[in-house]
Image (spheres, grey):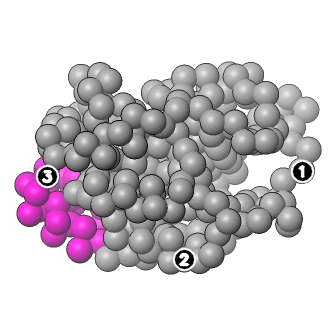
Amino acid sequence: MRIGIISDVHANLPALEAVLAALGEVDALWQLGDVVGYGPHPDEVVARLRELGAIGVRGNHDAAALGGGGVEYFNPEARRAMEWTIERIAPATRAWLEALPERVEEGEVTLVHGSPREPIWEYVLSGWVARQSFAAFTSRWCLHGHTHIPVAWVQDHGRISLLEPGPGDALRLGQERLLVNPGSVGQPRDGDPRASALVHDTEARTLTWLRVRYRIAEVQAAMRAARLPPALVARLEHGR
Ligand code: ZN
């Protein structure tokens, strides 16, 4: 089976469509939360993921869009975009977001947005948090998003190491336990503005990162038309 793994789409339809085209035929699509927030296409992105039967979890922006709180922790631009999102989303979008669990276990894999310890909010940005995270799930590996940075934490006999994969790099699944981030589809923050995603080949037992160009100007124009904050419009072309 080939499984597409995406995270942090953030209501960016051109980025999502470019990633889907690059993934080609997949047997399943897993999404790791923050489907909405920041971007101009929340209803369109949710409709597309629903049509594709994506399996996945709720992120902090999804929770905020449902009135679940947390907006007080957002920076002013993120908060303005969230207020716009809350006003705009259709009942069908809301219902789909409401049905997303905080955590999904699929065989040897756990899916969360932030960390397995605190699925909605915690960022895995240090070896210390990675170590706590490995103690908070029992499957062989865990997929997460939230930081918008493609990385893999590897736990091998108690030692934790960090891999920073480039486009096309593959990780072979062995005995080690893994905490893997596909990067962000709709708002990358590692300095590369291209959409980021993962493909899992269950027979070859590999995870491969991909980076995909998309029409950034198109989503920026839609953001300007929606009067979303200029700082959010600008950051897309810098990947920061
Ligand atoms: Zn996010």
Q: Position of residue 177 (x, y in %)?
A: 81, 39
Residue at horizontal 50 percent and vertical 77 percent from the top: 21
Q: CA distance from mark 1 to mark 3?
A: 44 Å
Q: Look at the numbered discs 2 and 1 and tell me whether their residues touch, using CB distance below 8 Å.
A: no
Q: Which residue is mark 3?
A: 228
- Magenta stretch, residue numbers: 216-240
Of circles 2 and 1, the one toward us is 2
Q: Which residue is mark 1?
A: 174
- Residue 217 relative to residue 129: left or right: left
Q: Secondary structure at mark 3?
A: loop
Based on the displayed image, in which of its 4 quarters is residue 132 positioned? top right
Residue at horizontal 47 percent and vertical 29 percent from the top: 120
Q: CA distance from mark 2 to mark 1?
A: 26 Å
Viewport quadrant of the C terminus: bottom left
Query: Is 237 one of the magenta-colored residues?
Result: yes
Q: Position of residue 174 (x, y in %)?
A: 89, 50
Viewport quadrant of the N terminus: bottom right
